[in-house]
Amino acid sequence: MTAISSANEDEIRLREHVHAAQLAHLYKQLRVAMPGILINIVVITLVMINIAPVANVLAWSLFSSIVMVSRLASSYRFRRARPDPAQMNRWRRAFMLGVIASGVAWGSVSFVLFPDGQPVVQFMLMVILVSTAAGAMAFLSAYLPFYYLFLWLVMLPLTIRLFMEGTPQYNTLGAMSVLFTFYLSMFARNINQSFVESVKLRYENLSLVDKLTQQKEAAEKASLAKSKFLAAASHDLRQPLHALSLFSAALSDRKLDPDTKRIAENITASVHALEGLFNALLDISRLDSGALQASIETFAIRGIVNTLDNDYRPEAEAKGLKLTLDCPPDLLVRSDRALLERVLRNLLKNAIRYTSDGEVVLKCHVHDGHVTVEVSDSGPGIPAERQSDIFEEFVQLDNPERDRRKGLGLGLAIVKRIAELLEMDLRVESSPGKGSVFSVSVPIGSTADLYRPGRQRKGVVDVDISGLRLLVIDDEADNLKAIDLLLSGWGCETILATSVEDAIDRLREEGGAVDGILADYRLRDDRTGIEAIHAVHEYLGHKVPAMLVTGDTGVDRIQAADASGYRLVYKPVKPAQLRAFLKHLAMQPQQA
């Protein structure tokens, strides 16, 4: 019943739309037709003023002019009003009255102005009336009832007048008039059908575009809701994971008996697995938000290949796979080193994971000014109809049970986004039972760009971080406990605060300066770590190095945090990241 009702509503809307388009066409074309009508009125008036009774000529001319001006004014009022389809009845009635008045004006010519005994003038009037009836078809045929009405109001009096003459010649002309009237009617019907079909087609196209727009907006809202959910869930889950990571690191630094040490190692392994999931989600969010910027440089790709060989050869050999990495040592590329390594790492990891026997090959070759890196395997292959799906988030064709050991289904989604960011050509060729070949094309590098002053990396220096005094601002009590335990184990002194105001109060109570600030990005009362750092700087009267810690993956928050200018790390923070920051603080006096 609902489907029938909906179909009826659609039919009613379509009919209203067609009628509205017909009227809009009539009113628009009326302005175009008026100059021709005016010329005919002037010609008839000038010719007939000395032939027909003057009163008849002047009365007809005045009436026809009034009708013409009234219809023209109605056309301009319609254009200004721009009525909705549901408001067209009043305008339809107004146009019909204009058609009747105009038809009466032209039809009256056959009796009011038709002179007796002057066949030349009669023939001229007949030609004008026939051309007027035919010319009106150009715009009145859009709405057949109006054209039929005008046609018969003009041609019926003319036909009657011709038959009234009674001679064979006039009877022939009368018969021709009847045939011509029927011919115009049929021709107008064909034009009307074409016009109505075009209006319906346009309406259907607009309806289709409107539906597609609605579906697109619904998809965008769903995507935004998904992103908001992932951002909120990611932040809330990162909080305890961040504390767990710090507690695990603090526990691993202690002297433990063998059994406890194994438990600590298992805890650390589980934490690292969770970190992998959250880091993958973070990469997706940062790539989608545009917060991740590429740092383009020229380097030898063999360095990345060697790293991948060291990392994945044991895994490949453990599965009995032959791993071949073929890349010339002097082959240079121009790209972002870290992002390109991430792409190749994900491709190689997938190839090894989904290949049960045979070989995996990574090969580099130069073609048309680019270096193409291919990762091929002898795995099960991918059906052609599913090859576009594998680059979507959480899609795994061979893991319906969602076994975590087979990955998360985010690797290729990250590969696709990084390839778009770096403008690399990403391709896949595969067929079931014949393995897969993934390839990316990277611009070739120039030797001239490789050696530049100031590019040498500084060696890693072992720096004593004990004795550093740090202000830690976080509204999560577990996070404060965990980081205090970790930093205390490293010999650092901590001042713990839960808000901006609490940080200022603790500094006032503790006194003295601090060497650095660790601030969570999202604090209570919609405050941010950026505001907290600024407030501390203002209180101290000078700036000190600061690190922002965030678990947010929302686009706006990622962009705001990245734009702050402070060192930014994402939860769960690895102890190595924290130690590197502290070494930087400890080295500052030496550098000064």
Image (cartoon, helix red, strand yellow):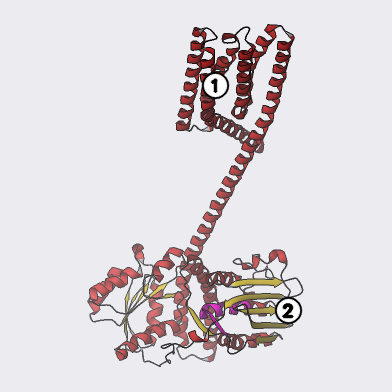
| Residue on which the image places disc 2 | 378
The magenta segment is: 326-347
- 2 or 1: tag closer to the N-terminus: 1
The amino acid type found where label 1 is placed reads Asn
| Residue on which the image places disc 1 | 40
Residue 456 in the image, given as x and y percentages of width and height = 44, 90
Tell whether position 478 is magenta.
no
Q: Which residue, as the protein is rendered here, is positioned at the far right?
A: 433
Horizontal side, residue 424 vs residue 500: left or right? right
Is any part of residue 380 visible from this angle?
Answer: yes
Horizontal side, residue 118 vs residue 176: left or right? left
Residue 392 in the image, given as x and y percentages of width and height = 61, 65
Residue 119 in the image, given as x and y percentages of width and height = 64, 12
Residue 434 in the image, given as x and y percentages of width and height = 76, 75
Horizontal side, residue 278 vs residue 176: left or right? left
Badge count: 2
Q: Nearer the viewer, residue 267 or 439?
A: 439
